[in-house]
């Protein structure tokens, strides 16, 4: 579903990502962890085609992202949801309009937009504030709207960058429940987070990064049915 092969990205001659390789299967739930500056956001932005890698190969949903014609980016994004670290909501549009727009750009029939946008906002507990604009919301509320926007199109791939960074533990927990639910329905989920408590609780694959490199990939650690690896201490993928 998502395959990275020796992906390298430079900013002003300094590498933010260095030889990053991994494979994420369809339907997997993966955490990206690592200290500030490790390259997590850079990696997610490259997957979302908001940044371009300088070297390496990326295949996503059968498309060669590295060689992707810019005109194909909207097509790829139709099947993706993204929660940005800084939300990126449109400040002049209401909460409702922010969500509705995400549906409109993928060609959702007009009659369905209102119902689906309302349901998505309800999932994150923001339906009562749908007529407000983002600057009128707290950071945590904006974050929940950003989560609703990423989920509303039921994407094949959900990329989330610190989606609970501004939430209290309870709201953070609810967001991870939503991610788990959407993952159970088949969406591949990749979440960058510092919330190690949640990472431990969720018991999913962890790709750890440091200074632009993958330092640990727990791909093989979770025992698979029939693998005979009852200890869960299998070989590392990297
Ligand atoms: N637009 C940019 N221009 C120059 N350097 C950048 C840019 N974006 C990121 N970097 C650099 O790339 C490196 C990785 O940054 P990135 O934002 O991917 O880290 P991160 O793992 O997401 O950190 P955090 O946990 O703080 O969000 C950092 O050293 C950062 O300074
Ligand atoms: Mg980041």
Image (cartoon, helix red, strand yellow):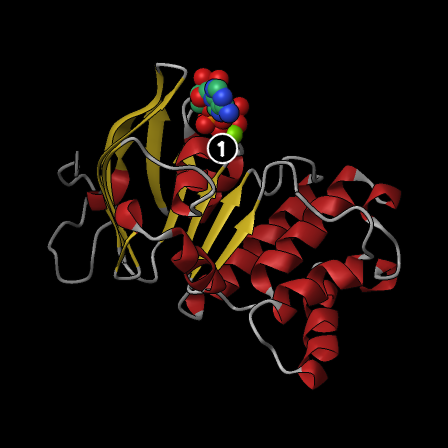
- The percent coordinates of residue 27 (x first, y second) are 34, 62
Q: Nearer the viewer, residue 158 or 170?
A: 158
As displayed, is residue 167 above or below residue 2?
above
Residue 170, given in percent of the width and then of the height, sits at 69, 46
Q: Residue at x 79, y 46 (%)?
A: 91
Q: Is residue 134 left or right of residue 172?
A: right
Give the residue at x 40% y 40%.
46
Which residue is pictured at 43% across the width and 32% down the height? 42
Quarter holding the N terminus?
Answer: bottom left
Mark 1, residues whose alpha carbon is within 10 Å: few (<14), some, or many (≥20)? few
**Which residue was labeled with disc 1?**
196
- Could you tell me residue 32's position as x and y percent? 40, 37
Q: Secondary structure at mark 1?
A: helix
Residue drawn at x 55%, y 70% is 106
Residue 113 position by quadrant: bottom right
Relative to 87, say whether 186 is above or below: below
Whole-percent x and y of residue 65? Answer: 31, 50
- Mark 1: C-beta under 8 Å from nearest atom of ligand 1: no
Q: Is residue 207 visible in the rendered structure shown here?
A: yes
């Amino acid at each position: 579903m998502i395959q990275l092969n020796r992906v390298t990205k430079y900013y002003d001659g300094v590498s933010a990502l260095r030889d990053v390789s991994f494979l994420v299967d369809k339907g997997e739930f993966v955490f990206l962890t690592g200290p500030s500056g490790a390259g997590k956001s850079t990696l997610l932005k490259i997957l979302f085609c908001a940044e371009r890698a300088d070297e390496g190969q990326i295949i996503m949903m059968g498309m060669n992202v590295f060689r992707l014609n810019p005109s194909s980016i909207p097509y790829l994004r139709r099947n993706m949801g993204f929660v940005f670290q800084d939300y990126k909501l449109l400040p002049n549009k209401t909460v409702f309009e922010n969500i509705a727009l995400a549906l409109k750009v993928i060609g959702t029939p007009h009659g369905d937009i209102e119902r689906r946008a309302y349901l998505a906002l309800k999932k994150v507990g923001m339906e009562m504030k749908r007529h407000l604009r983002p600057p009128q919301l707290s950071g945590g509320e904006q974050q929940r709207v950003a989560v609703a926007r990423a989920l509303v199109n039921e994407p094949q791939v959900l990329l989330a960058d610190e989606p609970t960074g501004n939430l209290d533990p309870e709201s953070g927990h609810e967001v991870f429940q939503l991610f788990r639910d959407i993952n159970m329905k088949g969406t591949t989920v990749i979440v960058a987070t510092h919330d190690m408590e949640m990472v431990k609780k969720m018991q999913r694959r962890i790709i750890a990064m440091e200074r632009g490199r993958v330092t640990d990939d727990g791909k093989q650690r979770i025992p698979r049915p029939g693998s005979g690896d009852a200890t869960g201490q299998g070989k590392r993928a990297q």
